[in-house]
Image (tube, rainbow, N blue to C red):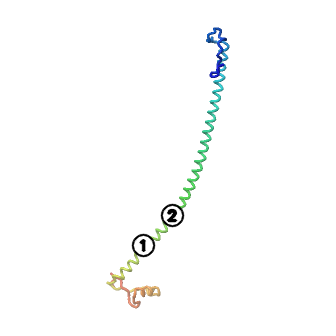
């Protein structure tokens, strides 16, 4: 038998002696059976390798799916944390907005008082509310060097 092809190189079985075989001879049938057997073995090995490649591919896809699930969990946890932080910031922002409005109102009132004190001329107006002259008001009046026994003047007022 030839080692590279697995075929017999013996030509004496052909009957002619010149190395040519007759179709249908027993050796020819054996060679065909040998080829079929080798092809069948080769096909089985190829199928086995294909199944192994397929299994490796499935395993790599399973690993990738697990990694993607982990990534998804981490992203969802980060999203939850970010959402909670956003809600806290929005609540704090609302509180700060209310504080800004309150402080703006106070500033406006203080600017009006300062304007009145710096440009205070014009009509006279008595404070009709006796609570205006309480101890708290007296402190305010003393701070601005006002005489509590004298009525306060408000610009643009006329009696």
Q: What quarter of the picture does the N terminus occupy?
A: top right
Q: What quarter of the picture does the C terminus occupy?
A: bottom left
Q: Is residue 140 above or below residue 34?
A: below
Q: CA distance from mark 1 to mark 2?
A: 22 Å
Which mark, residue 89?
2
- Secondary structure state at the residue bearing disc 2: helix
Looking at the image, residue 121 sits to the left or right of residue 92; the answer is: left
- Residue 43 x, y percent position in the rendering: 63, 27
Mark 1 vs mark 2: in front? 2
Picture mark count: 2
Q: Few, some or many C-alpha atoms within 10 Å of disc 2 (few <14, some 14-19, many ≥20)? A: few
In which quadrant of the rendered view does residue 148 lie?
bottom left
- Residue 42 x, y percent position in the rendering: 64, 27
- Asked if marks 1 and 2 touch (Cβ < 8 Å), the reply is no
- Residue 25 x, y percent position in the rendering: 66, 12
Between disc 1 and disc 2, whose residue precedes?
2
Which mark, residue 104?
1
Query: In the depicted view, which residue is nearer to us: 118 or 75?
Result: 75
């Amino acid at each position: 038998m030839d080692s590279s092809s697995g075929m017999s190189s013996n030509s004496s079985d052909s009957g002619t002696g010149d190395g040519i075989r007759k179709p249908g001879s027993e050796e020819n049938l054996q060679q065909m059976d040998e080829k079929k057997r080798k092809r069948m073995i080769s096909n089985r090995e190829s199928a086995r390798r294909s199944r192994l490649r397929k299994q490796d591919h499935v395993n790599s896809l399973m690993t990738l799916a697990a990694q993607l699930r982990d990534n998804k969990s981490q992203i969802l946890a980060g999203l939850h944390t970010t959402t909670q932080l956003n809600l806290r910031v929005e609540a704090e922002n609302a509180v700060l907005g209310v504080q800004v409005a309150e402080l703006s109102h106070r500033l406006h009132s203080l600017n009006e008082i300062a304007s009145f004190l710096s440009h205070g001329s014009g009509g006279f107006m008595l404070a009709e509310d006796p609570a205006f002259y309480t101890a708290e008001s007296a402190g305010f009046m003393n701070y601005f060097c006002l005489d509590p026994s004298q009525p306060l003047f408000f610009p643009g007022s006329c009696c």
